[in-house]
Amino acid sequence: MYKIGEFSKLSAISVRMLRHYNQLNLLNPQVIDTESGYRYYSSKQLKKVNKIQRLKELGFSLSEIKEMLSTENSIQEYFEKREKEVESELEKLVNQKKMIQRSIHDLKYKKEPLNYHVQLKYFPEQQVVSLRSNLPSYQEEGKLWGLLYEELAKEKVNLQQLGQHKAIFHDKEYKEKDVDVEIQASFKGEITLHSKVVQIKKEPTVKAATVVMNGSYHQVSYVTESIACWIEDHQYKIEGKMFTIYHVSPAQEEEVEKWVTEICFPII
């Protein structure tokens, strides 16, 4: 048997952390001397210590580790769940890296982030094919476009009939998940659909404050700031849902600098 200090050296875990494990009932001393209060650990407990440390390295919390070591369920479920979390974290980190690189580029070439020209536009009534769904996040919008084109292909729709492509964001407030997004493609002539998910509808005339943005979407916050200032200065009010028109989208052009997007806020 080993005193807590000795076991600390053997396990490469601080005494403070061993006491914390004990409080969590994650790793308890083998024996506690009732008279002296000394804590004694067994060499056999090093196997459990190694499991705990390994699971910590994989990103599991102590509460999760406690559950994993005490449950009778397959540990594979926990690893599969963690794998999905890591994939999501990696995606966020990749996006953050891109934003940092673009910010460095903007600083290097002294781009003015708020130099956007706001226009007042009237969008005429138009016929559209429409697909609306709740998505896990705004980044999932591309999958919605893929589904729309898949459904149109099933209906043998001539894609040459399609014109303006836009996305409408129906939530009354900004949401980080479970976002209500509708995508639309305008068309002329006649289209007949039997799809259960894609609709044909008429979009009314819309008056909107807009900015045509070239390049990456990381500029959107600056664009909305410019539009907000313009709306306030011209004594308008937002009336309706924000929408985005994709003049040149990532699906059409891989080079980010060639993307052309119009951010629109309906106003009265």
Image (cartoon, rainbow, N blue to C red):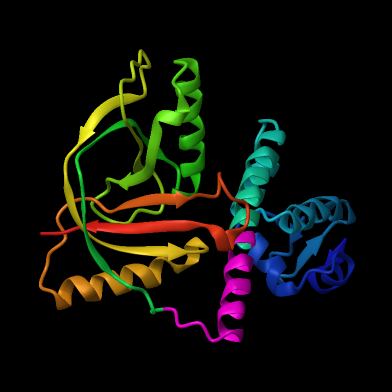
- Whole-percent x and y of residue 47? 85, 51
Residue under the point 27% across and 45% down: 170
**Quick one: which residue is furthest to the top in this view?**
194
The image quadrant that residue 104 belongs to is bottom right
Classify the position of the C terminus by image quarter.
bottom left
The mark total stands at 0
Tell me: residue 24, above or below residue 84. below
Q: Does the magenta stretch include residue 104?
A: yes
Residue 169 left/right relative to 28: left
Residue 6 left/right relative to 94: right
Residue under the point 45% across and 47% down: 137
Relative depth, front residue between 107 and 87: 107
- The stretch in magenta equals 94-113
The image quadrant that residue 24 belongs to is bottom right
Q: Is residue 158 magenta?
A: no
Residue under the point 33% across and 73% down: 117
Tell me: residue 265, above or below residue 225. above
Residue 42 left/right relative to 191: right
Tell me: residue 88, above or below residue 101. above
Question: Is residue 29 visible in this depiction of the protein?
Answer: no
- Whole-percent x and y of residue 20? 64, 66
Residue under the point 43% across and 51% down: 247
Classify the position of the N terminus by image quarter.
bottom right
The dominant secondary structure in magenta is: helix
Relative depth, front residue between 160 and 227: 160
Question: Is residue 9 visible in this depiction of the protein?
Answer: yes
- Whole-percent x and y of residue 120? 21, 64
- Whole-percent x and y of residue 107? 57, 84
